[in-house]
Image (cartoon, rainbow, N blue to C red):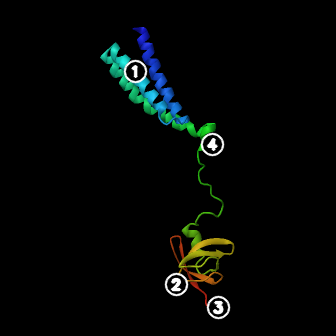
Amino acid sequence: MFWWLVLAIFLFLLCAALLVAEVFVPSFGLISLCALASLVGGIAIFFKLSPTAGWAGVLVAVIMIPAALGFAYKIFPKTRFGKEVSLDGPTRQKGDAIPDTEQLQGLLGKQAMVISPLRPVGMCDFSGTRLECVAESGYVEKGKTVEVIKIEGTQLTVREIENS
C-alpha cells in the first residue's frame, strides 16, 4: 500500500514536470497528453487506496495544475530559449511620444513648416519638433508655412499663411 502511495505521488510530480516542459518544448500537445495520462493514473491510484485519498488527490490536482503552469509561464521569459523566441516590448526614443496638452499650449500662434501634405492631417516641423497637425480647411501642400490657431487636447489645428 505504501508503494502505491509513492507511485501516485510520483505520477503527480511527473504531471507537474511535464506541464512545465510543455511550455518550453514545442511538442504539439504530446507532452500534455503524457501529463494528462500521469495525472489520471495518479488519481486512479489515489481512489484505489480510498475515496478520501482520491478526492484529496483531485483537490491537489486542481491546485497543482494552475500553479505549475503559472510558474512555468512566469519563468519562461527569463530563460535563454524564452529570450530568443519572445518579442521585446516597444521602445520609445526621446521625442517619440505626443507631447502633453500643457506643452502644446505654448505652440498657440507659432508657425511651422509643412513636411507632409495636410489632407487635412499631416506632419509639421516646429523648429526641429515634428508634430501631427490638422488643417483648418482643405489641403495644404508640402513646404508651406502654417500657424497654430487652435489646440484641443493633443490635436493642433493650423491655418496656412498666405505669403508662404
Check contact, mark 4 vs mark 2: CB within 8 A.
no
Q: Quadrant of the N terminus?
A: top left
Dot in front, 4 or 2: 4
Under circle 1, the secondary element is helix
Q: Which residue is mark 1?
A: 41
Task: Choose the circle earlier in sequence order: 1 or 4.
Answer: 1
Q: Which residue is mark 4?
A: 84
Q: Residue at x 34, y 14 (%)?
A: 48
Task: Choose the circle earlier in sequence order: 3 or 1.
Answer: 1
The extreme right residue here reads 128
Disc on res. 103: none
Check contact, mark 1 vs mark 4: CB within 8 A.
no
Dot in front, 1 or 2: 1
Q: Residues within 10 Å of mark 2 (few under 14, many from 20)?
A: few
Q: In the rendered structure, which amino acid carries the disc numbered 1?
A: Gly
Q: Which residue is mark 3?
A: 163
Please tell me whether residue 122 is drawn above or below residue 17 in the rendered image: below
Q: Which residue is mark 2?
A: 138
Q: Is residue 154 left or right of residue 91?
A: left
Q: CA distance from mark 1 to mark 2?
A: 73 Å
Q: CA distance from mark 4 to mark 2?
A: 48 Å
Q: In the rendered structure, which amino acid carries the disc numbered 3?
A: Asn
Task: Choose the circle earlier in sequence order: 3 or 2.
Answer: 2
Q: In the rendered structure, which amino acid carries the disc numbered 2?
A: Gly
Image spot of residue 10 (x, y percent): 47, 18
Image spot of residue 102 (x, y percent): 56, 69
Task: Choose the circle earlier in sequence order: 3 or 4.
Answer: 4
Observer-nearest of 18 and 126: 18
The extreme top residue here reads 1
Check contact, mark 3 vs mark 4: CB within 8 A.
no
Under circle 4, the secondary element is helix
Check contact, mark 3 vs mark 2: CB within 8 A.
no
